[in-house]
Image (cartoon, grey):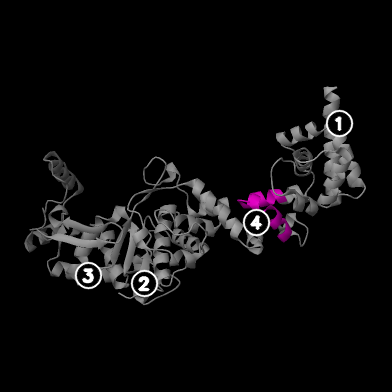
Amino acid sequence: MSDVTVKTRFAPSPTGALHIGNLRTALFNALLARGHGGRFVLRIEDTDRERCSPEATQALMGNLRWLGLDWDEGPEAGGPAPPYHQYERSAIYDAYYARLEAEGYAYPCFCSERELEMARRAQRAAGQPPRYPGTCARLSAEEVARKRAEGLQPALRFRVPPGEEIRFHDRVHGEQRFRTDDLGDFIIRRADGTAAYLFTNAVDDALMGITDVLRGDDHLTNTPRQLLILRALGLPAPRYGHMGLITGDDGAPLSKRNGSRSVDDLEEAGYLPEAILNYLARVGHTYDTDAPLDLDGLAQGFDPARISPSPSRFDPDHLRHWQDEAVQAATAERLRLWLAMDALVPPGYVPELINAVRGNIRFPADGREWAKRVFGPPPALDADAEAAIEGAGAAFFETAVAVAEEGYNRFRGLTEALRERTGVKGKRLFMPLRAALTGRCSGPELQPVVDLMGGERVKARLHRAAALAAERSAQEG
């Protein structure tokens, strides 16, 4: 199989928001296709019309586009195997159902859920794995007609051949073997006429030319059943790879309860797409570099052989690390659009401010806070800043005010003149100034921040600090 024929797919059921686990599946399949010059297909598996919604579909596609995971074939993009919404493909499925039934690969099943549950209980009591006992597998044509005449609506079951072994090479787990005697005949169309996932998923992969499928290992046991369907229909099977699931801190599959977040949540929180992609590409998959990569770089280094079959824990600290990396790697213009703080900064100063405070920005709120601290009125003083101002004393700040009023209000001139007149240097000089000018005892390098403030702001903040220090001195006296 040459690289140019690689075609992968992401096939979500849009029943709600796109979450981390499904997003990683989309990303891995997109990277596999992109890294081999192949094609990435988006297929919407929405046969359950009650649970799936057009709104969720549009939101999902918007999420993928925001992340840069555009699809080559699928809704709104077109392609050679339309339609790409499964609910529009019922005629295709019906033709294959009819063929399977006519050739003896499938049969109608009239068993009620109560009858099936009683059979499962009996099997468990006998120490046997629960599977369909074949109750309807031997119904005659007359019996089937009679039950239909009684108004019973059957499901359609696939007839699993006995005594075989289904083998396939999993790109993550390696060689896999399943005994057909352990599978039991399974439903491919429900009694209400809706198509079952096992069937539609396999058939559409074949008809759309999907060559490679990467999915969670909760689907591993589906694969032998789908291979049986494809074999019966004479359709080609893709190469499968089943990766370990993402779990929460409690080791359970990731969910809202144990830390899962949707793409919308992450975007609203201020995460950059680059951060999310670099993080997820490394959840259960290794790269040779810890440097941030663009999509092409992630695709070049992606290899299914590097996917772990074991579960991987969702680590919010690691995600925040990649957010920091993404901020540091972004251009000033990229950050300007993301921070949306133009209204808080004098015209033309946004790039300078970004360069000054970039190392202290993780989310847009951080950038906007520093914009206010630098260009707004004197910022509120936190407790550490008040303590630093009080510790420096009124005389220190009265001298600082005098120096600034003389015109030494840029960083270098201010600090050199203040050092010369007070004899204070090092941390005892810079910490009180930082506290007075920014309201905090930590933050970005002070020189560019002070020089951006301008003389009037510097003087106003030093006057405030001098007054506060004098007031505290008077209270103590």
Please name the residue that numbered disc 4 is placed on: 339
- Give the distance between the C-alpha atoms of the residues marked 2 and 3, in whole angstroms: 16 Å
Q: Is residue 359 left or right of residue 99?
A: right
Please name the residue that numbered disc 2 is placed on: 83
- Label located before the other in sequence (4 or 2): 2
Please name the residue that numbered disc 1 is placed on: 470
Disc 2 residue type (three-letter): Pro
Q: Which structural element holds mark 2?
A: loop
Residue at 61% over, 57% down: 328
Please name the residue that numbered disc 3 is placed on: 96
For the record, the magenta segment spans 351-370
Q: Which structural element holds mark 1?
A: helix
- Give the distance between the C-alpha atoms of the residues marked 4 and 2, in whole angstroms: 40 Å
- Label located before the other in sequence (4 or 3): 3
Q: Give the image quarter of residue 85.
A: bottom left
- Label located before the other in sequence (1 or 2): 2
